Image (cartoon, rainbow, N blue to C red):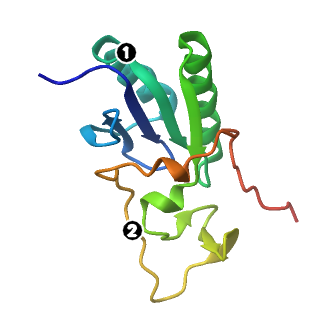
Amino acid sequence: MLNKNNTKILVISISNPILVGVYNNNSELLEVIAKDGKTSDVLPLIFDKLLKQYRIKEILYVNGPGSFMAIKVAYIFLKTLCIINEISFKACDGFYFNNNSPIKALGKKYFKKKNGKIEIEFLENDEKIEEFNLPKFLDDRIFQKDSLPNYNLPAVN
């Protein structure tokens, strides 16, 4: 029987489909939920189901870079859920979940992580964009207690 206690939930809402992974206490992936749609529409439906099925001890999410609105909505929704239910809340950037591939920014520009710094640039001709994936095992060391969104907004010219 599936142990439904002390579950960890990982949310990647900066791409479509939105990915949600359910992990056991040993950080092993138990369930994958992939749903297309707007973060504001999808997350409440997913968490309505998850809160009925699991005792969640920790929510982890990708806090950027990516869609400003998706990050903002995910943060507000998840942070509120964590406060109300006394759930731990942590974050990390999205590059960990797409093999450090560029992430769509504005227009034809992409976020790229170089030497630990996130920059906005055009794609090189040979650069490949990889999809986001939920790891089979979570490395808890990549998540920070500072869960504030990392918007990486460029300066306005």
Is 62 located above or below residue 47 in the figure? Answer: below
Q: Position of residue 125 (x, y in %)?
A: 49, 89
- Label of residue 60 in the image: none
Pick out the residue farthest to the front: 26
Q: Earlier in the sequence, mark 1 or mark 2?
A: 1
Q: Which quadrant holds the C terminus?
A: bottom right
Q: Which quadrant of the structure image shows residue 34?
A: top left
Residue 129 in sight: yes
Residue contact at pointers 1 and 2, CB within 8 angstroms: no
Q: Is residue 22 left or right of residue 102?
A: left
**In the image, farthest residue toward the left:** 1
Q: Secondary structure at mark 1?
A: helix
Q: Position of residue 75 (x, y in %)?
A: 62, 32
Residue closer to the observer: 82 or 35: 82
Circle 2: residue type: Glu
Quarter holding the N terminus? top left
User: Is disc 2 placed on a helix, strand or loop?
Assistant: loop
Amino acid type for the residue under numbered disc 1 = Leu
Residue 137: percent from left, percent from top: 32, 50
The residue pinned by badge 2 equals 130
| Residue 118 against residue 46 in the figure, above or below | below
For image coordinates 28% across by 51% down, the residue present is 136
Q: Which residue is mark 1?
A: 51
Towards the viewer: 99 or 146: 146
Image quadrant in which you'd find residue 99: bottom left
Residue density around tag 1, few if under 14, some if 14–19, many if 20 or more, within 10 Å: few
Picture residue at 68% right of the left edge, 42% below the top: 149
Q: Seen in the image, is 75 located left or right of residue 139?
A: right
Judging depth in this view, the residue of 105 and 96 nearest the camera is: 96
